[in-house]
Structures are given as structure tokens and as C-alpha cells.
Image: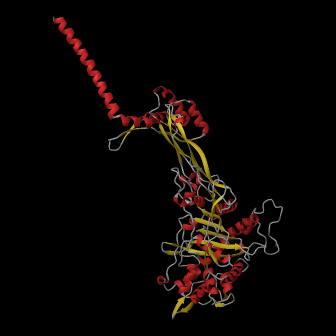
Amino acid sequence: MKRGFFSAFRLGLVCTVVLASYVGIGLRLVHLQAIESPELAQQVRDARRRVQLLSARRGEIRDRNGNLLATNRSFIEVGADPQAVRKEDEPLFLALAGVLKRSLSEVTAELKVKTIVSGDGREVRQVRWARLAESVDESTYEEIMRLGIKGVYGNRQFRRAYPMGSLAAHVVGFVNHDNVAAMGVERHFDFYLRGQDGWLESERDGRRKELAQFRSRAVQPTDGMHVELSIDSMVQDMIERELREIVANYRPVGATIIVSDPRTGFILGLGNYPTFDLNKFNRADLASLRNRAVTDIFEPGSTFKIVAASAALNEGIVTPDTRFDCGVSTISYHGRKLVLPRDSHENGILTVAEIVSQSSNRGAAQLGVLLGEKRLYDYCAAFGFGTESGYALGGEVAGMLHRVRDWDGLTITRLPMGHAVGVTPLQIHSAMAAIANGGILMRPQVVQRIVDRDGGTAIAFQPYARSRVVRPEVARSMRQMLVNVVQPGGTAPLAEIAGFEVAGKTGTTQKIIDGRYSNRHHVGSFIGFFPASEPRVVVSVIIDDARLDKTAYGSTVAAPSFKIIAEQLIQYLGISPTEPAMAGMSVAGESNPFTNRRDRLR
């Protein structure tokens, strides 16, 4: 009886447990199938579904002759899906770390972190991608794949590369490691260069291989267009080599050289010191990244005298032969006596042409007084000072040109000699180009056209005339005056090139240090063009604070560099002499016509 009772009890207990188990399993199945089914199904789909980004290839940046300045380098980013990594593959982690040149502990940590918790602790998310290497080459990736570690794979991507290093760095710009275009052409023409990424949606098996039969949607990437610059790599190289010579000889704070075609405004070369290597942009300091040609403001000094002289000629109040007494120290203006600026040497009676060629401050001041405040200001503005030039790559400042109402009693006599005004190198370069091309202020441009992937022209940039500044005959008169600047008796004989009519103007201005003009710190410049009768190129050389024991005049530090670059341009561009060849010109057959040229200038 007793035994039968316990046997029945045990049987009932077993049946109850079995029944309860089935009920529990049934309830769990109902819960999974009815309640959690949508969420679980989504997890399965997410595990199998693969949405892959198809990166567009960024367009190239080329110079005017098709030479590559910016292109793309293919690389493979290596990572892993920690959820797929198997425990039996752990012995291979050491070999993987060796190939990746990382420590075993770092690689193991990346591969074993399977979940992450949100900041508020409410959400736990599975880690499906752990990056092991930002960039490896093909051979390294093949070696990784041969290890056979499940869940480790790579994604092919493109990274920007700059084959010519620092050449035209401030024009080209760069794309940073986050694939963001940061400056120059890269940034301001990013819309055309970047293209449009595509994507691919499909399913994959347990080994993360695509199941092509389940591919559902695919949008192919649209590669970016190419940008063709007006920059000529050969001209740019001439500029940058000369900048290195300037730095070696004078140890300046900064320097800028610009070469352009005055007829179109297209820039053939633009270089600054300091500069940087585009492939190592992250190592450059902020001073090196700055495009000084459009960001740095300085008082131009005597190069600015072209404004007052051409304005007076254009207004018809003087001729090149009009004479001024440049020995006087004061002048009467609107019932006031104004003190004239001093000249570096005593002058007597000078014509307008001699005021320009001998760079007389007092003569320029008298031209300004003849013009009057309003006309002088209007011509300064017409030449592009006080406003941005329209340089397309950004970062440009407008410079400083005070309204007449803000002038003090000395401005009318100081502005014509290039004081009380702040300009950028590109502004003063463009003003001289207006004299060279017959009196038209052109917009400076560095991009010629946008090229599609088939090589056709998508957009062509045409020369853009901003305004006419002076009449053509006035520009011709000014060109002849500027030719006299580089002749014996002018301020820049070191810029003269035998057999060619060179026109230009020197500039030397004291820098303002601690609120006062310094006698030791100067900006020396020379801006010129040739051939004067039919100018092909304008060249500006501006050197900030050359370290010399004496005053760093533009005629001393900048004019020789102008000549060196100009003679190379003559050879490269095939510019013909404007008069019979004279002694001093290099002859055909010389192995290097530029050898020791700097020594000959000293």
C-alpha cells in the first residue's frame, strides 16, 4: 500500500514535470513565434543582409598640360566581425598581429569585444566591425587572408595622393584623413571632384561571402570629374626653386612669387614660403598652410605709384613730360600746407616719367594732390584695392583702403607712395597686370576647365574682365615709363634682360613693429612684365623681412629673382626678343643657360 502510494506519487510527479516542461516549451514557442517573431526575424535579416558602400573615385587635379597634381591611391582597410570570430582561430592571432605590425594584446582586444553599452547604460549593441588596420597594401592583405581567420576581411577604399609633393600646395589643397576636402582646389571644387558614392544590398553566408543570387539592389557609384588648372608645373617649379634660393640667401619671414598671363588673368604659377608637403599636411603648422598671396596684407610702397601716375595721365591733368619740383618739402592743398614725404636721395625738377623711373616719393605725392582725395580714392578702388579680387579658392582678404572721410591730413600725400594702404600680393600683381594688358583689370583665375570622365569639357572658365581702369593709350605710356625703371638710372637695373623690353616697378616699405615704422624690417618687392610692347607674362616677387645688414630694398632682394625667373620663362615659353640679341644672352648649345646666373647678378 505504502509502496504503491509512493510509486503513484513518483509517476504523477514525473508526469507533472514532463507536462510542465512541454507547457513551458509551448509557451516559449508561442512567445518566440507570436510576440518576438518580428524582432528575431529582423536580427536574422540583419545578420545575413549586407549593405556595402561603393566608393566613388575622386576626380584628378591636373595642370594645364595634363600633369597629375592630385590623384587617388587604392588601399584596403582591414577589420573583423567579432561575432564571427571563432575560438579555435585564437592561436592565429599572433601571426595576424605580426602581419599588421601591432601587439598581440591590441589585436586580441579588438577581436574579443563583442558588445558595447550606450552612454546611459540602457542599450547593449553588438559590435559587427572592429578596425584592425586603417590601410594595407595588396600583398599584406593577401597574407592576412591566407591565415584563414573567420570574420576577418577588408574593404577597398581610395585615398588622395599628391605625386608632386609640395608643388603648388596652396593652390591644390588637400583632402584630410576623414576624407574631408580642407583647402584650395580640393575644397572649392569638391562638388565636381568628389562624385557620388553608390551602394550594394545583398545577403551573405556564414563566411561573409556574398550570395549573388540574393542581391536585391545596386546603385553604381558615379566617379568625380577632373579639374584642369591654369597652373603650369614647369613654371611652378621655377617659382619654388627660386623661393628656396631666396630663403637660403635672405632667411625671410615669408615670400610670394606669382606668374600670370596679363591678357587672360590666368595664373601660371603661384608659390609661397613657407610651404608644406601635401602628402604630409598633418605635420605642417598653420603658418605653412596659409596662402600668403591672398591672406597677407602689407604696405606696397613704391609699386603703388603706378596708381597715381596712371590716374593723373588718364584724367588728362599731366603728360609724361610734365615737370614737378621734387626738391620742395611742402605743398599747399585746400589752403593748408602739407609736408611732403622724404626721398631716399635729393631730387630737383623731374618729369612724370622720371618720377616713376626714379621712384620719387615727393613727385608721387604731388600727383596725388593734383588728383584730389576723391579721384585718388576712386582710382585706388578701380585698380582693385580694398575689395577681393574674385580669386576662386577662398581665404582671400579685401586689404585695407580707407574711405576719404577717414583720411588724416597726411593720407593725400602718403597714399600715392604706397603708405596708408594695405594690399595682398595678388592685388598688387593684378593692378600691374592691368597696366600690362592695356588698362583692363582681370579676375585672377587658377582653373581652366572641368573635365568629365570621358575627357570632354563639362565647364570651361573664360577670362573675366572686371573693369576698364585706364585708357589703352595711358597704359601704353605707363608701360614705357616702367621700361625706364629697369634701365640705367632707374631703380631696378638688376631686372634688365638683354634683348628684351622689361617693364616693372620696385617697392620697399618699412614694416610696422609695435605700432611704429621699423628701420630694420622691410618688405621688398619687384613687379614686372615683358615684353613691354606686347606683354606675355607678369611676374611678382615679394619678400617679407629679408635678413640683411643693410636695408632690404626691392631692387636688391626681389629684382634679381624676377630676372632669374623671367629668363627661364623666355626659354620655356619661347618668347622672342623685342630687339636684336645683345651680349649677355645665352647662346644655343649651352648645356645649362641658367648656371651661375645668380652669381652674375651680384
What's the coloring here? secondary structure
Q: If the image is split into quadrants, where does the C terminus sit?
A: bottom right
Left or right: 282 as drawn, with respect to 353: left
Q: If the image is split into quadrants, where does the N terminus sit?
A: top left
Query: How many callouts does the rendering have?
Result: 0
Q: Residue at x 80, y 69 (%)?
A: 585
Q: Is residue 551 visible?
A: no
Tell me where residue 25 appears, x and y as whole percent: 31, 24
Which quadrant of the view contains residue 291?
bottom right
Q: Work out which residue is located at the far left of the displayed protein and give it.
A: 1
In the image shown, does 188 or 514 lie closer to the viewer?
Answer: 188
380 up-or-down from 285: above or below: below
Tell me where residue 521 appears, x and y as whole percent: 56, 71
Which quadrant of the view contains residue 508?
bottom right
In the image shown, does 568 or 231 lie closer to the viewer?
Answer: 231
Tell me where residue 385 appears, x and y as whole percent: 56, 76
Q: Is residue 391 visible?
A: yes
In the image shown, does 317 or 300 lie closer to the viewer?
Answer: 317
375 up-or-down from 30: above or below: below
Tell me where residue 503 appears, x and y as whole percent: 70, 76
